[in-house]
């Protein structure tokens, strides 16, 4: 723990070799015109708070030269002097005065001081050292003991004290402000009340510790004392709430303790600051020590009962802070050397900074572990969902394949029924009626065979290439129409680079053309059938297909309820196009189809590999 090295350093000040510690002095009041009256002997250090002194006093000290004389410059080290003071050696001022006698805006009593004693001002035998102190009641004025000796030796002692007191206080102020700045985004990110309380504690500590590093406060000393002591109360209260939050102490006793401290501070702090009553501050500091001890006891009990890491860390930091507070209180109010000592309580924040740093790292690591665990659970759930989705997709694919097969089976059955079925029934009726010319019988059988071939050809797949599609259609139609004595006239003018259809639409279009051809073979008694395919001149993204014959023709309005025309209308709607029959002026029928080259998706069956 940091407290034990600090306490050890506080009690183990290095000793200057060949130096003298001056503790006996004669104290004389100094009048308005600088005249000194009768003096009285005093023992140093000598604080004015206990006796309620105020004004201007001269301390006369004496030391003898070493037997070997002065071989080098000497130095003077004063652990504490003030509120303002000036020093003279053998009637010669050693340095400019540390503050004017009537300047109440400065206070040099919070820092150690070192002055050079030139060899030319020293004399063999007795040397007289006069220190005139100007101070106010209840402002911690007075004079500590004085250390004189060789400059290098005395300077080392002064350096130790300056490091522990002044530089250490400055480090506490800077560290507190840095931690407060670092805690701002942390408190915002974590939304943590404990972090916010610690941030406020750092700010209060920085403000309170500035008394040890500034010689001229920004406010009159009464108001400055009010601000400094109020900041001390705020620091203790925020640390209390911080410890209670992290250690999960019962709120009722903590609130009672905090309320008592607030009431005590509201009474004692202004009383001391404006009433200049040192007893009020002593009583207030005793209450602060008692409050700290009780809080430490509660945190320690929490650790003994629940054995939490937060309570253990806070108990160690609180124990160190209580030890420092007890040390300071004893030194200031009860020890004879108290006026020459310096307070360690300013360093108590370092203990809580270490505790807070550990707890923040612990919380962040715990949150990272929780996030990692949550991330693992999410990944596991995602993998489970993905597996179920894959299984569902495979099932739907299998179902889709079965549906496609079922639709293809239904198509084949419908085509057999509407095409070959009717043809075979007609053939059977002719055979049963007897007296069927052989030529007609052969024609009916050949037509049925060609319809069966077209039915099988409907199962062929295409990749959307229109030239391949119409080439296949032409190849199959020419042979079959030729067998039926029908000549095919084919005109195709399409650009495959920009004009194409999906595979499903190619199959649907082929079925439509085959069914139209079957109707011509069965009913038209035609000699020529013409198919003309081209892009619509008005709409390049639309394909036009015209199928004409020179047969007997029919009236579309009278035949609209037939199964053949309904099947053709269904296939046109399936393609998303527009089709119509119209009689030719001279002889036969014409069917015209307009088909968009990027039609809506088909619901027609598509083979699944």
Image (cartoon, helix red, strand yellow):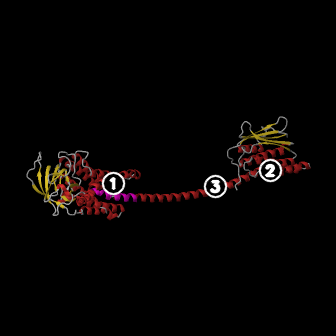
Mark 2 vs mark 1: in front: 1
Is 300 or 425 nearer to us in this picture?
300
Is 21 or 185 nearer to us in this picture?
21
Side (left or right) of 193 relative to 93: right
Side (left or right) of 210 relative to 415: left
Q: How far apart are marks 1 and 3 (CA)?
A: 66 Å
Q: SS of the residue at dot 3?
A: helix
Instruction: Give the crowd class for mark 2: few <14, some 14-19, many >=20 residues within 10 Å.
Output: many
Asked whether the viewer can see residue 531, the reply is yes
N-term-proximal mark, 3 vs 2 = 3
* Residue 64, percent from left and from top: 14, 60
Main secondary structure found in the magenta portion = helix
Side (left or right) of 9 relative to 374: left
Disc 3 designates what residue? 396
Q: Quick one: quadrant of the N terminus?
A: bottom left
Q: SS of the residue at dot 2?
A: helix
Disc 2 designates what residue? 454
Mark 1 vs mark 3: in front: 1
Q: Please tell me whether residue 39 belongs to the stretch shown in magenta.
A: no
Disc 1 designates what residue? 175
Is 559 or 512 nearer to us in this picture?
512
Q: Distance between the residues labelled 2 and 1?
A: 93 Å
Query: Which span is picked out in magenta?
Result: 345-362
Q: Distance between the residues labelled 3 and 2?
A: 31 Å
Instruction: Name which residue lies at 21% across and 55% down.
Output: 116
N-term-proximal mark, 2 vs 1 = 1
Instruction: Give the crowd class for mark 1: few <14, some 14-19, many >=20 residues within 10 Å.
Output: some
Is 250 or 243 nearer to us in this picture?
243
- Say above or below: 314 vs 480: below
């Amino acid at each position: 723990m940091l407290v034990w090295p600090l306490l050890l350093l506080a009690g183990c000040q290095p000793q200057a070799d060949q130096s003298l510690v001056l503790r006996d002095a004669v104290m004389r009041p100094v009048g308005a015109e600088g005249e000194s009256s009768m003096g009285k002997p005093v023992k140093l250090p000598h604080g004015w708070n206990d006796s309620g002194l105020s004004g201007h006093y001269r301390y006369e000290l004496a030391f003898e030269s070493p037997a070997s004389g002065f071989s080098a410059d000497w130095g003077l080290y004063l652990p504490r002097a003030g509120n303002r003071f000036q020093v003279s050696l053998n009637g010669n001022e050693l340095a400019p005065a540390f503050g004017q006698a009537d300047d109440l805006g400065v206070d040099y009593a919070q820092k150690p001081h070192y002055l050079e004693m030139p060899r030319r001002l020293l004399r063999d035998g007795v040397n007289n050292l006069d220190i005139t102190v100007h101070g106010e009641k209840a402002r911690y004025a007075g004079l500590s003991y004085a250390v004189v000796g060789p400059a290098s030796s005395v300077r080392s002692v002064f350096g130790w004290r300056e490091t522990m007191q002044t530089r250490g206080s400055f480090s506490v102020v800077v560290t507190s402000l840095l931690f407060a700045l670092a805690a701002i985004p942390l408190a915002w990110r974590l939304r943590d009340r404990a972090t916010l309380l610690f941030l406020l504690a750092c700010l209060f500590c920085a403000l309170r510790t500035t008394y040890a590093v500034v010689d001229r406060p920004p406010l009159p000393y009464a108001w400055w004392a009010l601000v400094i002591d109020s900041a001390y109360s705020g620091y203790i209260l925020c640390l209390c709430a911080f410890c209670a939050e992290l250690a999960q102490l019962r709120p009722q006793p903590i609130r009672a303790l905090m309320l008592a401290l607030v009431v005590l501070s509201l009474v004692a702090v202004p009383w001391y600051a404006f009433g200049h009553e040192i007893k009020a501050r002593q009583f207030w500091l005793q209450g602060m020590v008692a409050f700290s001890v009780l809080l430490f006891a509660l945190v320690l009990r929490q650790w003994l009962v629940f054995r939490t890491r937060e309570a253990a860390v806070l108990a160690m930091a609180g124990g160190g802070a209580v030890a420092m507070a007890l040390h300071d209180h004893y030194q200031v109010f009860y020890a004879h050397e108290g006026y020459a000592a310096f307070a360690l309580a300013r360093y108590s924040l370092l203990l809580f900074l270490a505790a807070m740093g550990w707890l923040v790292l612990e919380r962040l690591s715990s949150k990272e572990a929780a996030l990692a665990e949550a991330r693992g659970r999410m990944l596991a759930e995602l993998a489970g969902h993905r597996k179920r989705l894959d299984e569902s997709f495979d099932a739907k694919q299998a179902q889709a394949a079965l549906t496609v097969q079922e639709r293809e089976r239904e198509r084949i059955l419908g085509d057999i029924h509407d095409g070959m079925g009717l043809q075979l029934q007609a053939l059977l009726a002719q055979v049963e009626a007897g007296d069927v010319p052989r030529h007609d019988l052969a024609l009916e059988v050949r037509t049925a065979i060609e319809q069966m071939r077209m039915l099988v050809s409907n199962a062929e797949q295409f990749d959307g290439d229109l030239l391949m599609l119409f080439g296949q259609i032409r190849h199959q139609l020419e042979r079959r129409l030729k067998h039926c004595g029908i000549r095919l006239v084919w005109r195709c003018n399409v650009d495959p680079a920009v004009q194409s259809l999906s595979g499903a639409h190619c199959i649907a279009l082929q079925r439509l053309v085959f069914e139209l051809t079957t109707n011509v073979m069965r009913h038209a008694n035609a000699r020529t059938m013409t198919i003309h395919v081209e892009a619509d001149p008005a709409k390049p993204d639309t394909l036009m297909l015209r199928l004409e014959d020179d047969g007997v023709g029919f009236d579309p309005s009278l035949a609209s309820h037939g199964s053949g025309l309904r099947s053709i209308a269904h296939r046109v709607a399936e393609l998303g196009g527009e089709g119509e029959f119209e009689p030719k002026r001279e002889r036969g029928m014409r069917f015209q189809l307009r088909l968009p080259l990027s039609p809506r998706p088909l619901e027609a069956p598509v083979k699944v590999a």
